[in-house]
Image: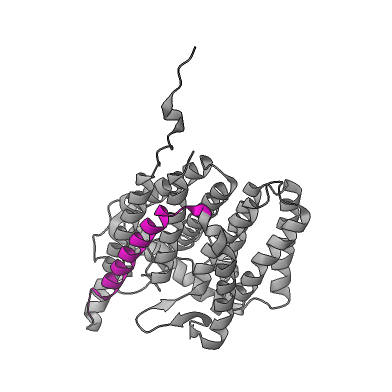
Amino acid sequence: MTSFDPSLLRRPREQFDAVLFLGLALLGLAGSFFVYSATRVQLLVAGYNPQYYFERQFGFVVVGIIAMYVVSRLDYRRFDFLATPAYLTAVVALAGVFVAGQSALGAQRWYNFGFFQVQPSEFTVLVLIVAVATFASRRNEGLRLYDIVRLLMMVLVPVGLIVFQPDLGTAIIIILVTAAMMAIAGVPPRFMSFLAVAGGISLVGAVYFNVLHKYQVDRFVSFINQNSTNKAVAALVYEVANAKTAIGNGGLFGQGAFSGMQTTMGYVPEQRTDFIFTAIGEQFGLVGALVLIGLLSLIAWRMWRNGRFARDTMGRVLCVGVLVFFCFSAFENIGMTMGIMPVTGIPLPLVSYGGSAVLVFYLAGGLVLSVSRRVGG
């Protein structure tokens, strides 16, 4: 007769993904240095504190790492009761920027609190990831047509508000993230195909009926025709050309930290934020760029792995949502600096300067770490 094994009654050990945690922490710390390296010389020349952006970014990263660890200690299944109030708060915040928000670069999408700015559209991505995962986990019998319609309406309301800010890049991310989560949640392929066609028709209609702003259309035109002589489009082409020149100047090992003509002379716009990868390529070369991409890939693999071994639907859908959010942001940001993707305002995760983006990506990482703690638990 087989003896009883008491270990069967013990709670399975938590499997905290230390590799993912350390990878995300290292990426943020490296990003702080990259921001410092890209801005130090220009700030010195202008007579400002050369460590201004570094100090702020480093502070954002430290707060983000702490927040990530706190979220990782919580049970992700307990976030379901926060889904509805968080969603309603996000919608109100998105609508509020049209009344009390700050305008910059032709967009009105920030709240200014003096020491820092908050962009609610970035937090909305995270809120929708939790909301969609919660919605899917509550339907054990699968998503029916009625459920799919409700889910689409839930997503399209904030997407519409974000498009009119305008912030097309974040809207595209939400659509891609939602599509991936719906596929994992069990939406039939025929519905996914129909939604893809409907999305394509909607995009064409948005251009035809002038829903998109002219500069947004110009960005796509500059991507499709990088030899255009149109003045508005040529300016965007020139920016991308300088970005590619900066990356090419780096060669194999780069020109060194705080060096590089394109970076130190400010030929590339928004280099601490949207175009941070150009500074990395010029100063640290192909080797430095590949190390960064390797770290991004390691983080993505750990997110995929945690999603694969998640114990329930909510865990799987959460991990997939965060994975697509992270991967597409990185691919789009790096791709636009090399001319293989259209120019958007999507940041390079945990590398581009910005407190809102840093906190959002760390909170998202905390959700995946929470799932990893409860694999098989």
Image quadrant in which you'd find residue 33: bottom left
User: Residue 154: within the magenta?
Assistant: no
- Give coordinates of residue 214: x percent, y percent: 61, 79
- Give coordinates of residue 361: x percent, y percent: 43, 61
Image quadrant in which you'd find residue 211: bottom right
Q: Residue at x 46, y 81 (%)?
A: 111
- Give coordinates of residue 293: x percent, y percent: 39, 51
Q: Residue at x 45, y 48 (%)?
A: 300
Q: Is residue 222 visible?
A: no
Image quadrant in which you'd find residue 134: bottom right
Which is nearer the eye, 307 or 37?
307
Q: Is residue 288 above or below residue 258?
A: above
User: Residue 65: within the magenta?
Assistant: yes
How many discs mark residues in the rendered view? Answer: 0
| Predominant secondary structure, magenta span | helix
Q: Seen from this angle, which residue lies furthest top?
A: 1
Q: Residue at x 64, y 57 (%)?
A: 135
Q: Is residue 47 above or below residue 55?
A: below
Q: Is residue 159 visible?
A: yes
Is residue 255 left or right of 150 when viewed as pictured?
A: left
Q: Seen from this angle, which residue lies furthest bottom?
A: 99
Magenta extent: 49-77
Is residue 3 left or right of 324 when viewed as pictured?
A: left
Which is nearer the eye, 374 or 243?
374
- Give coordinates of residue 267: x percent, y percent: 36, 73
**What sort of colour scheme is used for the picture?**
one colour
Q: Residue at x 54, y 52 (%)?
A: 318
